[in-house]
Every structure is written in C-alpha cells, then in structure tokens.
Image (cartoon, rainbow, N blue to C red):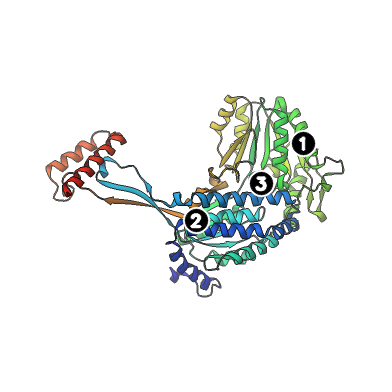
Amino acid sequence: MNAVLKEDNVYRPLFDRQLAKSRELALTGAAERADKIRRLLKATLDARPAILEAGYKELRLSPTDIDAQLLMVKGEAEFIARNLEAWMADQPIQGSIMTLGKKSYLRYEPKGMVLHVSTWNAPIAEAFVLAFGAIAAGCTFWLKPSELAPHSAQVIADIVKSAFAEDEFAVSVGGPEVSSELLKLPFNHFFYIGGHGVGRIIMRAAAEHFATFTLEMGGKNPVIVDQTADLEEAGRKIAWGRVANAGQVCLAPDYALVHESVLKGFVAQLGKFMTSMYNADGKGFQKSADLPRIVNARHFERIKALLDDAVAKGAKVELGGETDAADLYISPTILTGVTEDMRIMQEEIFGPIICVLPFGQREQAVATIRRRPKPLGSYIFAKDRAAIDWFLARTTSGSTVVNHNLIQSGTNPYLPFGGVNASGTGRIGGRYTFLECSNARAVVEDQYPAGDPNIMFPPYSDKYKKMIGQMLGKELKIPDGVVNAINGIIKFTALFKKK
C-alpha cells in the first residue's frame, strides 16, 4: 500500500501511523469502542460554550438551534454505544440445500482507514455522527472540516485532541489544498457531505485507490401540496422547513408544487407562518433572533443572483425579497410566477427562498420533478391516502416525509439517511454508518459431513452427474424449515457417531 504514496505528501507520516494503528483497532471489542464513543460525546458536550460561540460567529445561530444539533449528536452516540455489541456479533445466515452440514454467517470487520471531508452548515453533527460509526466499526478516522466554518473547525480539532491520539482520530484544518493532499492517500473509505463538484473529486480519488465511498450531496428537494392537504398545517411546517438555518439545509424543501385549486390559500398560509415565526413583533425579519445569516459573501451573492434573475424574468415576490450584503441577510421569501428558464429552478437555492408552482394534473407535478436529478428528500402533503400512494409510487428520492418535512434525519437512528444518484450514494445514521465502515465478510464453516464428502470431487461419478442434472432441471424450492431440519439431523447423527 505504501508504495503508491508520494514521498512529498506532508500527511504521509501520520497516515502510516494510522495504518499501523488500524490493525490494532481491528482487534478491539465492543466495550472498548463504546467507551471511546462515550468519551468523545463527553468532550463534545463539555465544549458546548465554545460550540455556541462558534455557531453564532459563523451563521448567527441561536443557542437552541445549536443545542438541537448537539442533541442529534448525543442521541447518535448513545444509540450506537448501546447496540454495538449486537452489531459486532457474528450474524447467522440461513443455510441452503447446497450447504447442508455447514455453518454460514457474516462477520463484520473494519474497512481500516476512513477519511471524512465535511461541510459547514451543521459542522458538529456532520463531523461526529460519522466519526461515531467509524469508531464503532473499529476504524481510524481522519476529518477535514470545512474552511467555511473556521471557528467550528478549530473547536472540533480541540475536542478531538482532548479525547484521542491523532494516530486514531486526526483532524486537519485548512482549505482545499488540505483536502487535495489527503485525497492522494489510499484511505479505505471516504465520506463526503457537500456539493456535486467536490463529490466528483471524491469519487475519482476513491477510484484511484479502489476505495468505497459515501456521498451526501443534496439537491432540489420538491414538496407536493395536494388539493386535499391541510393548508394551515402545510404552511406552518414548510415555513419552518424552508427557513430553518436560513435555508442552508441539505434536506430543506426547495420548491413547492401546489394544486392550482389551493395555490392562493397555500401561499397565504406560508406567508402567515413565516411572519409569525420570524417577524412576530413586527420589527422586521432582519431583527429576528432566530433567523440565521448566510455563511459568507460568496454564497450570499450566489443566492441574491438567483433571486434577481427570477424577478427580472417575471417572478412575483409574494413575501420578503429583502437582502443586506453587509449583514449577509436574506429575508424569508416566497416566489410565484416561476418558470423553468429561471436559474432558481435549475440550481439548488440553499437559502431562505421557496418557489411555488401550480399544477393541475398530478402528472404535471411528477413531470416537473423528473426533469431534475433525483433529490435527497421529497415531501408530500395530502389527506387522501390514494393521492399519497400515487405520488410515492411515481417519484423517487433518498427519503420522503408525508405531511411534514425535515424530520427524517437525526430523529430516528433506525432509519437510513442518504441520497440516490446525483443526491448521493450510501447510507448513514445508527447502524448504517457502522455498516458503511465495515466489510461484511461471508464465512462458511464446513462442520458435519452430509452423505459422501468426496462425491463433489473429480472424477465425477454417474450419481453426482445425475444429481446435478436433476437439480438444474427443476426449481430449488425447498423450504428453509426443511433445510434446517435436515441440518439438525446431520448434526445429531455426526455427534452420535463421535460417541
């Protein structure tokens, strides 16, 4: 492995140390790994004041929003630590008629060395949720936090340093040049959360090393509002889902496809709840203590350009539309009259702006969704069960929520989280992160002879040839219960013969 590493790579010495350490970690048990997860969680919660300060400096997040992120981290750590022993245990596999007298099982072993190139919009959760899974699997972990959240990156580095030696968990703070050097190293698995541009770079790097990878890349998430939807409920929930974190959430609803018969009522409800949540005192959205800011000037200008382009091409601002470059502020905004030629319908917004488009027939809504890459998340608001099932059957996404939004990640550790095609590959959360960092090694142990143990070896007997021909010529539909009963007889017979 080391032969492929470039001599001038500044990270090679630490990489080699992690490589050596990974072989030790592979031999650790569930209790030791769980203790490490709890240790990292404690260090994270102890650093809450520094985390709160960093989140405010970067996005002007309220303490409650950051605490919600910490709660996600806490829930993940505790869930993994509690269940890890069962996950690590050998998993029995049902035998078949072809494996009579044999024991089949899966043994989960660590892939080895894991690199995570993380993003900035929820830096603590995105760093440690994946780290917990890698630690649980018995891997080393190397984290490259986003340079767009430099305060959080430094806090993360300090937390990790207090809990781990760097040959087991390393953090490299810096810009794209750091990621570039790290991606030259033959890690066994890559995690990435972010956009398509860097996602392609990660995939190419993984291909160079024949490494596996998990990508989460967002996209234009649609929300469908059926004519049977409760408009007040839809307006309240979508207002929250679109404006949370100033829209800088990979799962946020990007555009709403609303049945034309309820379009006006939906827009009114959406505007009412955006106002009640973020301008209840009438002092203006910009004064809200719960409305974060855009992460930096570049992203602010990108979002503003999408808004300006839409308005210039005829979109109507139903609510909001205000911006302040000096404050990196964009108000909660509702647009109608949006058309396909507008950039805002071609790019992920990642800001507190939602486009509302009417549809008459259900097929029109589905066609609009299908013209875009498969999204990370999708949402359906309807009271009619038939309508819900119709839309579920004709759309696809990494996840879907019915009659709510933004609640499918970080709330239920039993659910997998991830995208499909352009919105990502692989699954994370709870046991799924553990599985992404593990090799499911199939093991078959030959235990008890079933008939003549030499019958399968050349020169083939007429009896064996006939048996193979008969099996080939008919469906192998022997029930599992029968297979298990035969295996029991074989085992019992073998034990009796030993006596």
Gap between marks 2 and 1 measured at Cα: 42 Å
Q: Residues within 10 Å of mark 2 (few under 14, many from 20)?
A: many
In the rendered structure, are the residues bearing label 2 and label 1 in contact, judged by CB atoms less than 8 Å apart?
no
Q: Which mark is residue 341?
A: none
Whole-percent x, y for residue 306 in the image: 73, 47
Q: Which mark is residue 348?
A: 3
Instruction: Report whether 42 appears left or right of 333.
Output: left
Gap between marks 2 and 3 measured at Cα: 34 Å
Q: Residues within 10 Å of mark 3 (few under 14, many from 20)?
A: some
Disc 2: which residue: 136
The residue at 81%/54% (across/down) is 327
**For this rendering, which residue is in front, 427 or 85?**
85
Query: Looking at the picture, which amino acid does disc 1 mark?
Result: Phe
Disc 3, SS? loop
Query: Looking at the picture, which amino acid does disc 2 mark?
Result: Ala
From where the camera sits, is residue 426 visible?
Answer: no
Where residue 419 sits, quadrant-wise, is top right
Disc 1: which residue: 273
Q: Residues within 10 Å of mark 1 (few under 14, many from 20)?
A: many
Closer mark to the observer between disc 2 and disc 3: 2
Along the polypeptide, which appears first: circle 2 or circle 3? 2
Vertical arrangement, residue 209 with respect to residue 405, above or below: below
